[in-house]
Image: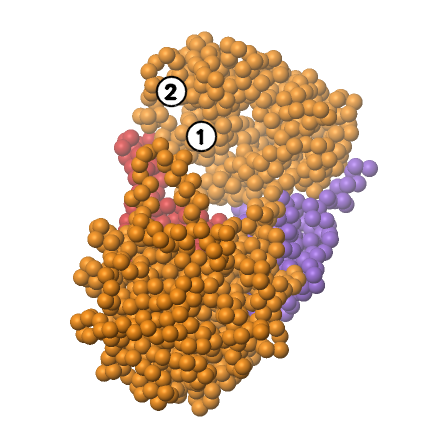
Chain colours: A purple, B red, C orange
Amino acid sequence: MLEALYRTARALPLGRAAADPARSGIVIQPAGAEARFALRVRDPGASAAGLPLDGPINSVRGDDRRWIARLGPDEWLIGCDEAEADHLPAAIAADLGERAHAVVDVSHRNVGIDVSGPLAAAALNAGCPLDLGEAAFPAGSATRTLFGKAEIVLIRRPGPEPRYRVECWRSFATYVHGLLVEASLGVGETARR
Amino acid sequence: MLLIACPYCGNRPETEFRCGGQAHIARPADPAALSDEQWSGYLFVRDNPRGVHAERWNHVHGCGRWFNALRDTVSDRFLETYKMGEKPSRTESTEAGSTPVKSTQAEARA
Amino acid sequence: MAQPFRLSRGGRIDRTRPVRFTFNGRTVEGFHGDSVASALLANGIHLVGRSFKYHRPRGILSHGPDEPSALLSVDRGPGRIDPNNRASVVEARDGLKTLSQNHWPSLEHDIGAVNDLLSPVFVAGFYYKTFMWPRTFWDKVYEPFIRAAAGLGKAPAVPDPDRYANRHAHCDVLVVGAGPAGLTAALAAARTGKRVILADEGPEPGGALLHDVTAEIDGRPAAEWLSATLAELDSRENVVLLPRTTAFGYYNHNHVALAERVTDHVANPGTAPRERLWQVRAGEVVLAGGSHERPLVFADNDRPGILLAESVRVFLNRYGVAPGRRIVFATSGASAYAAALDAKAAGLAVTLVDLRTEAECGPELARLKAAGVEILTGHTVVGSKGTKRVTGLIVAPVDRAGRCGPRRVLDCDCVGMSGGWTPAVHLFSQSRGKLAYDERLDAFLPGTSAQAERSAGAAKGTYDLAEVLKEGFAAGAAAAGSDERKSFTASPTLTGFKPVRAMPTDADPTKVRAFVDFQNDVTAKDIKLAVREGFHSIEHVKRYTTTGMATDQGKTSNMNALGIVAGQLDKTLPGVGTTTFRPPYTPVTFGTLVGPARHALFDPIRTTPIHEWAEAQGALFENVALWRRAWYFPKAGEDIHAAVARECEAVRKGVGIFDASTLGKIEVVGPDAAEFMNRIYVNPWLKLEVGRCRYGLMLKEDGYILDDGVVARIAPDCFHVTTTTGGAPRVLAHMEDYLQTEWPDLKVFLTSTTEQWAVIALQGPKAREVIAPLVDGIDLSPAAFPHMAMRTGTICGVPTRLFRVSFTGELGFEINVPSDHAKAVWEAIWEAGQRHGITPYGTETMHVLRAEKGYIIIGQETDGTVTPDDVGLAGMIAKAKKDFVGKRSLARPDVVASGRKQLVGLVTDDPKLVLDEGAQIVDDPGQPIPMRMLGHVTSSYWSPNCSRSIAMALVADGRALQGRPLHVTTPEGFAQVTVVDPVFFDPKGERIHA
């Protein structure tokens, strides 16, 4: 019975309850069980395991189910289905050949929260000090940054709608989720009325 | 809150960074060959200039990279940031400039 | 009749929307759009407070943010009581309760007013001069007295129930102030398409245009121009217009803090936060914050009913309120004439007294004369009549030499005074810009910029409307990178004034009280006295007299005070200089600064996957860094001592289960991983076999211990490093620093896996029996899996890195499993352990068990000045290594010198006495004070397994003192102890290999 737990029933810290606080126009949705890998390599070449490595720093490539975010000159964060997790490190290693690299499974370290809606950026800016405007942080952007007192990776999904993925470490998830919900309450309310 | 131009990420707020003190102090290749005085100089003795200071910064909540910066300790203006292993384009201890800092994150990335 | 002083027409109030609030319990009626001040004045209420020191009756001086006197407590319900709100900026709304301050028993009859009679006593520096001797009175008599007398209003007694928001925002151009200059600046910037934020502290943008009912701009009334301009700004998506938003702080690199008051003006705020802190990073800033009017300094210039002249005009035109029916304007400049013209036009009785001679006046004189107003030029004001309301102004002609002619009393119920204008350079000065004195304008103006900002309009000393509009437009365009310029036509503005510090008087200047700073009750003679007593620096005068301090920060008083000091010292104004302008520009609530960082959102509370289980078991928790760790698991009726004793015994005799998930973990990967480890740690790593562990010790370059932890070699090119709970970020940063900056040639990558792996520590003689049925793929036999080995396999079907390690001295395992599976594995072990009496234990028991074994804890036995040898771990150091971080420092003279504090055990003569951690240790308690302190206790516990207290300590040359008696401080005196080896239990270490 216990064997069945593995890969089938991860106890995610936030569960899956979505919050749309007071119909504020923001949907805050904890992500499901996904696989994540931290990839480190200095001379990456164009791609590995079909994941592009030649994107600029602070950009994300791929789609919602299989994505790779370049966080630094030699650092990437990869997200993919759990089903792929067993094979991905080997596939990357095979493509990178002799190049020194590290692929470390961080699936359980990271927690994802999807934030979308017209006021999503305003809610994120309650804790994130970055310029999230169209010019500075367009769709396809990704970076490590801060949200309040927690470190996060912020990804803006490709596409015209404002859809963000917030990735944080497991033990910060309650705080990050709580601050997001708090920030979205009345985020559109201004003194001008 | 300072605005610091990470050589990899562009302008980012100070809270994403950690300052690592004076730059360009290489760890001696053979510490055992150093006298006590030389070693204590390496360990403890640092400049504290009024004016331009070369210092180490780490974009710890960003790309994670260490880099160097020239900062005016009077005005807090950053004259320049550059990657580890690189040299600053200016070498003279320039007077605290009067040209105001102008930049937004967007411009730095453009 | 309600609102007897409301004019029959005019004003921007909405007469169809009445509002009711209370003032000291009395219902006050006003209209939507009123400030509390304007509504009070509409009802003829001028007496609104008692002054700080003399408890003199005070009224409303100003219409704006510079109000020094009309400070009210605003009560919006429990926890929502704010003291010291300026009546001039609080918007009137239904349900508001306002209260005056600083009086007892009532505003009308205030005992404290006796201070006014004693005023000769309360001179500048009164407190410093009076409360000096005898010394015994300092804390018993003087301090309680001063504390009771100090402060205005009362702080709320219950927590603030409101929500406060935070917003980081970016723009190309931030415009501060939405008066004529700010509006044209925003317009010009917005037309370039750049991102613009326009912030104004008032409820309605417009600034002076809101009360200038006669001016025309580009051929139409100013109000129409204002509407059109706002409509254009509103139509542009690149403009964020923030009313009720004060830019209060200008920080580095164009980081400007704004406070947006979102809901105070509405009765039912809903989900909206009360206030929002905007942290704006602007490419360029345009400062268009306007200017402040100066009061005139004459005897008894503080009576209720005496207002600033422009404020009289604002109450008349913007609020449709007459502050009086017989108004005397007293001025040394032209702008008060505009107020007088409007008052006359409103049908009020108006007289104007001007210090200037006719020849010194401009076109304003003829215009006012033409309106039929009596004007006394060349007259000074020497006093006022009335107590709780001004009833007359005493004036006298004055000649060039300052000699006064015969006095004359002008009956009145309101005075509008004007001593000229002071540009609001606060934010410019905060930006570190240098001020420049302009003699023509008698003002400090923005001079050399330090940041990317520019000022425009009255904030820059430009007062003529057409010029203000043009200057604002140019500033906005330039800030947006455009060279577009635009001229405006506008009615000429009455400008110019003759600076006057204190009005000439025929009275003995040492006798009269002419107030300079209304909020702090500082008079002209106080300032003169301070200068005579030797306080020549303006900063000293400020602190000695308190002029310019408190909530208004001297907005109305600073220039007059400065002028008086300059006069006394016979210096120029720039020779005296200004005091420093510091944030905030106006008071900001704590809530705004704190924002959402309260309660659960104050700090991240990090919990492990086992946390809920521990909670359900009734664990108590302690904070370790940001983590909340299970401290101990009391059973019914147990205190901490009983619970810890039971837990300790269970581990030694059976098996205990402990959540070690918070340990820091770093995956060190790469072909040079072993070489990197060799350089970072004191230990040797090259020959560590795959599947083996080593206790690693890490130093800083200064030779002192930074951190420790068990490291396992997972593969030739991969190490699983563990760190202390609190040290995890520090160690990773330390490693990254060396890797990136000193050894970039090493092919090594570091990844934090602290939260990837949860760690279940199973410790005790029965540990193996418990997990044996759950583990697959690992031979658990002692021969195949010895102490300090690591194996990979599965437990409960979950992949694990299983460490055979121990921080208790018992047979033990640390079971690393991916975090999301940890709770299931933990519960399975818990279930399997039931028949072995498995006992959960917390950090307290962990501490005791390790202390019984003499294991150190970083941060407890070490404090950043402790070397490996100090704690008896010199044996860890790889002697053959030529270099590692910190090695050279271990040969430093002070590190090799004798007398260093060394780790020892201490046992008290009284086995029941548990020493205090941190207690000092001496050799001979009889020695004279100050005694020579040998060291201190680092760890101290009751040891259930030793049936006595045990302690660890750092003692100078301690290892040589084995068996010697020493003495340790306790709250009751010295306790005798004996120095022993720090291993108290199983000194041969046999149990660990079971």
User: Does residue C224 appear in this view?
Assistant: yes
Residue at image coords 65%, 64%: C268
Amino acid type assigned to the residue bearing label 2 in the image: Met
Q: Residue extending furthest bottom?
A: C219
Say whether disc 1 or disc 2 marks the residue closer to the N-terminus. 1
Residue at image coords 56%, 30%: C710
Instruction: Name the secondary structure under disc 2.
Output: strand
Residue at image coords 28%, 52%: C540
In the rendering, which numbered label is found on residue C863? 1
| Residue labelled with disc 2 | C933
C238 or C3: nearer the eye?
C3
Q: In this view, does C139 lie above or below C418?
A: above
Q: Position of residue B68 (x, y in %)?
A: 38, 52
The chain that hosts pointer 2 is: C
Quadrant containing the N terminus of chain B is bottom left
Q: Where is residue A27 in the image (x, y as percent from the top left)?
A: 68, 61
Task: State which quadrant residue C64 falls in.
Answer: bottom left
Residue at image coords 29%, 60%: C512
The chain that hosts pointer 1 is: C
Q: Position of residue C14 (x, y in %)?
A: 58, 77
C715 or C1: nearer the eye?
C1
C903 or C431: nearer the eye?
C431
User: Does residue B8 appear in this view?
Assistant: no
Task: State which quadrant residue C550 falls in.
Answer: bottom left
In the rendering, which numbered label is found on residue C339? none
Q: How crowded is the residue under tag 1: few (<14 C-alpha within 10 Å), some, or many (20+)?
A: few
